[in-house]
Image (cartoon, rainbow, N blue to C red):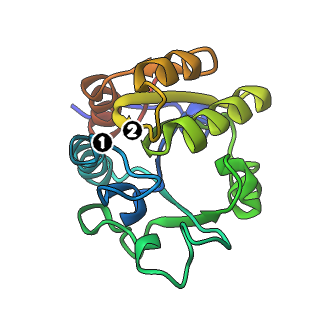
């Protein structure tokens, strides 16, 4: 029997949105200044999240860091997407040059018109984009669930420490917990907070 959802809540339900940050060659090439040591494991986790979100027909927002510098330069080869997680034509793509996803005016404007967004955040640059986005989301009253095992930090910073900092502003979850929310959306057309 199909689940009946009252019209008064059907149009106000929470829709999870997957935010994937900076899944670019710049982070995956060993020896580059912004390379992430465990990029392969992070990429695999992001790929799993992306596959599940696509199956559940959730909104997906891809973020690409672009800067006027030798790194993340749009004219260079290392600013391109990693092939296993390349955005599909029907998915949102945003570009940012400052740390937070909210620094992208199009993202802020779009999600300013979404009631009570619930973001699932994963990807590269957790110590840059992830942390700044979690702080900005928190200050706006938006909910973030940070999937730490599908995220990576670069430089000498310890990723566990970064996850701890992000945990001050977001809920820390693992991939199975994200799947659980995605599956509820797919099977029932609703998602709980």
> Quadrant of the rendered structure where residue 31 is?
bottom left
> Does residue 26 show up?
yes
Q: Position of residue 156 (x, y in %)?
A: 46, 33
On the question of residue 3 being in view, the answer is: no
Identify which residue is drawn at 71% across, 26% down: 138
Q: Nearer the viewer, residue 5 or 140?
A: 140
Q: Quadrant of the N terminus?
A: top left
Callout 2 touching callout 1 (CB < 8 Å): yes
- Up/down of 129 relative to 163, above or below: below
Q: Secondary structure at mark 2?
A: strand
In front here: 11 or 72? 72
Residue 137, how many percent across, how many down?
69, 33
> What is the number of the mark on residue 79?
none
- Helix, strand or loop at label 1? It is loop
Residue appearing at x 73%, y 35% in the figure: 136
Position of 141 relative to 129 (above/below): above
Q: Which mark is residue 152?
A: 2
Query: Which badge, 2 or 1, comes first in the chain's sequence?
Result: 1
Q: Residue 37: which disc? A: 1
Q: Is residue 174 left or right of residue 105?
A: left
Q: CA distance from mark 2 to mark 1?
A: 8 Å
x, y percentage for residue 4?
39, 31
Residue found at x 63% / y 31% = 134
At a point 36% along the width and 65% down the height, the residue shown is 25
Tell me if mark 2 has few (under 14), some (14-19) or many (20+) residues whose alpha carbon lies within 10 angstroms of its own. Answer: many
Q: Is residue 107 left or right of residue 176?
A: right
Vertical placement of residue 193 versus 31, above or below:
above
């Amino acid at each position: 029997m199909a689940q009946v959802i009252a019209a008064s809540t059907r149009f106000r339900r929470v829709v999870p949105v997957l935010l994937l940050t900076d899944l670019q060659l710049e982070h995956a090439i060993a020896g580059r200044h912004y390379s992430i040591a465990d990029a392969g494991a992070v990429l695999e986790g992001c790929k799993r999240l992306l596959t599940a979100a696509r199956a559940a027909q959730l909104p997906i927002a891809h973020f690409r860091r672009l800067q006027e510098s030798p790194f993340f330069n749009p004219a260079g080869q290392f600013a391109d997407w990693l092939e296993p997680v390349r955005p599909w034509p029907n998915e949102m793509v945003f570009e940012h040059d400052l740390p937070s996803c909210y620094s992208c005016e199009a993202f802020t404007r779009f999600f300013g018109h979404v009631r009570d967004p619930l973001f699932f955040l994963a990807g590269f640059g957790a110590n840059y984009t992830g942390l700044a986005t979690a702080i900005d989301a928190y200050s706006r009253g938006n909910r973030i669930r940070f999937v730490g095992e599908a995220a990576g930090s670069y430089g000498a910073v310890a990723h566990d420490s970064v996850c701890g900092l992000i945990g001050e502003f977001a809920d820390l979850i693992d991939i199975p917990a994200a799947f659980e929310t995605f599956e509820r959306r797919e099977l029932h057309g609703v998602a709980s907070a």
